[in-house]
């Protein structure tokens, strides 16, 4: 899957979200998207890194301690 395909998936999902609101005012859209995208991102990367936090942190471009905090925040540890 190319970056454009991933971008289009996000775009389509957001369009669906706004359509489903049926005129209601959205709130905290940025935080919602980050929360919903971050957990599966961490799950998939950790799986491919064989649960090696140092390797996963390197792949994600994060400090290992930052990754660990995010894993705890998402109840993945």
Image (cartoon, grey):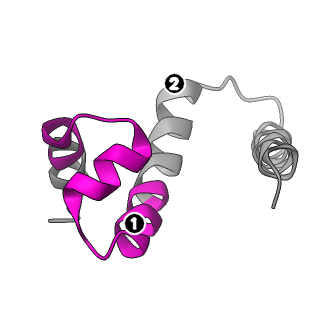
Q: Main secondary structure of the magenta part?
A: helix
The residue drawn where x is 45% and y is 47% is 38
- The total of numbered circles placed on residues is 2
- Vertical comparison of 20 with 77: above or below: above
Left or right position of 66 against 47:
left
Q: Which residues are magenta?
A: 40-68
Quarter of the image with the C terminus is: bottom left
Which residue corresponds to mark 2? 28
The residue drawn where x is 86% and y is 44% is 4
The residue drawn where x is 31% and y is 76% is 50
The residue drawn where x is 16% and y is 48% is 68
Viewer-nearest of labels 1 and 2?
Answer: 1
Label annotation for residue 35: none
- Vertical comparison of 67 with 24: above or below: below
Name the element at disc 2: loop
Mark 1 and mark 2 in contact? Answer it, CB < 8 Å: no
Name the element at disc 1: helix
Q: CA distance from mark 1 to mark 2?
A: 23 Å
In terms of depth relative to the viewer, which is nearer, 56 or 44? 56
- The image position of residue 39, as x and y in percent, is 41, 55
Q: Counting other residues with Cα less than 10 Å from the Cα at mark 2, is it few (<14), some (14-19), or many (20 or more)?
A: few
The magenta stretch spans residue 57:
yes
- The image position of residue 26, as x and y in percent, is 64, 26
Q: Counting other residues with Cα less than 10 Å from the Cα at mark 1, is it few (<14), some (14-19), or many (20 or more)?
A: some
Quarter of the image with the N terminus is: bottom right
Which residue corresponds to mark 1? 43
- The image position of residue 37, as x and y in percent, is 53, 48
Left or right position of 69 against 6:
left
């Amino acid at each position: 899957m190319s970056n454009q395909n991933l971008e289009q998936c996000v775009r389509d999902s957001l369009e669906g979200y706004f359509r489903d609101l049926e005129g209601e005012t959205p709130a905290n859209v940025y935080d919602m998207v980050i929360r919903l995208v971050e957990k599966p991102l961490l799950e998939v990367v950790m799986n491919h890194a064989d649960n090696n936090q140092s390797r996963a942190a390197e792949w994600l471009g994060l400090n290992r301690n930052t990754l660990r905090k995010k894993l705890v925040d998402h109840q993945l540890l």
